[in-house]
Image (cartoon, rainbow, N blue to C red):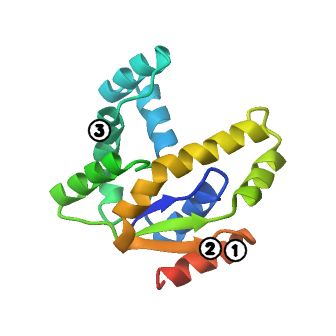
């Protein structure tokens, strides 16, 4: 299966992605891991990304898309993948469609983890991280809403929405039920 996971920070995407990847026997590809790998290995894309990051700028889509393109071409991703953190915007979704079209593939579904803002705030405050203040969390939620609304529209025909409140096991079961697995 080829899946994209969307949901606000704190919705449980990373936790669910790991469980789903194991059960489906496909790689969990997070943009954070991609960036760390490319930076650590000093790949050409990693070197390019570092220039922007060192300058305090956002890494342009073409660099991020390049990393995703290379990762999806690796042998373990041929049979499927779970993308976590990409795409974040409609232009990135268009780029992903192009990558998959070039490979003769398409997405099976976009799994949306639906969770109320207040639940996310409490989850993230409960982690006890110094950067997880209520103001920062609410700002991240607003950025998510602003960036992701067009993405959900772009993928309207592929969205599978799952209630992301409950135990990890309950949410995993809902995801697989929703995917017919």
Considering the numbered disc 3 on the image, is that residue within a helix, a strand or a loop? helix
Q: Quadrant of residue 7?
A: bottom right
Q: 112 or 14: nearer the eye?
A: 112
| Residue 66, numbered label | 3
Residue at horizontal 70 percent and vertical 42 percent from the top: 137
Q: 77 or 14: nearer the eye?
A: 14
Q: Quadrant of residue 4?
A: bottom left
C-alpha separation, residue under disc 3 versus residue under disc 1: 34 Å
Placement of 177 over or under 105, stated as above or below: below
Marks 3/1 in contact by CB < 8 Å: the verdict is no
Extreme-top residue of the structure:
55
- Residue 111 can be seen, yes or no: yes
Residue ID for mark 1:
169
Please report whichever mark, 3 or 1, sits nearer to the chain's N-terminal start.
Answer: 3
How far across and down, in percent of the image, does residue 85 sit? Answer: 49, 49
Marks 1/2 in contact by CB < 8 Å: the verdict is yes
Considering the numbered disc 2 on the image, is that residue within a helix, a strand or a loop? helix
Considering the numbered disc 1 on the image, is that residue within a helix, a strand or a loop? helix
Residue at horizontal 50 percent and vertical 18 percent from the top: 56
C-alpha separation, residue under disc 3 versus residue under disc 2: 30 Å
How far across and down, in percent of the image, does residue 158 sit? Answer: 37, 72
How far across and down, in percent of the image, does residue 71 sit? Answer: 34, 46
Left or right placement of residue 93 versus residue 8 in this view = left
Residue ID for mark 2:
172
Placement of 46 over or under 157, stated as above or below: above
How far across and down, in percent of the image, does residue 37 sit? Answer: 45, 35
Q: Quadrant of the N terminus?
A: bottom left
Please report whichever mark, 3 or 2, sits nearer to the chain's N-terminal start.
Answer: 3
Placement of 160 over or under 73, stated as above or below: below
């Amino acid at each position: 299966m080829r899946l994209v996971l969307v949901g606000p920070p704190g919705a449980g995407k990373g936790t669910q992605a790991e469980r789903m990847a194991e059960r489906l026997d496909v790689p969990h590809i997070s943009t954070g891991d991609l960036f760390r790998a490319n930076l650590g290995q000093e790949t050409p894309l990693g070197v390019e990304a570092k220039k922007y990051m060192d300058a305090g700028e956002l890494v342009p889509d073409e660099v991020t898309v390049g990393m995703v393109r290379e990762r999806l071409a690796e042998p373990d991703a041929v049979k499927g993948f779970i993308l976590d953190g990409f795409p974040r915007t409609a232009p990135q979704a268009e780029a992903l469609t192009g990558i998959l079209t070039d490979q003769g593939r398409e997405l099976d579904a976009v799994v949306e983890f639906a969770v109320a803002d207040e639940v996310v705030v409490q989850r993230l405050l409960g982690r006890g991280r110094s950067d997880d203040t209520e103001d920062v969390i609410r700002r991240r939620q607003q950025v998510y809403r602003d960036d992701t609304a067009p993405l959900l529209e772009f993928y309207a025909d592929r969205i599978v929405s799952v209630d992301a409140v409950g135990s990890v096991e309950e949410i995993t079961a809902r995801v697989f039920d929703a995917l017919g697995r």
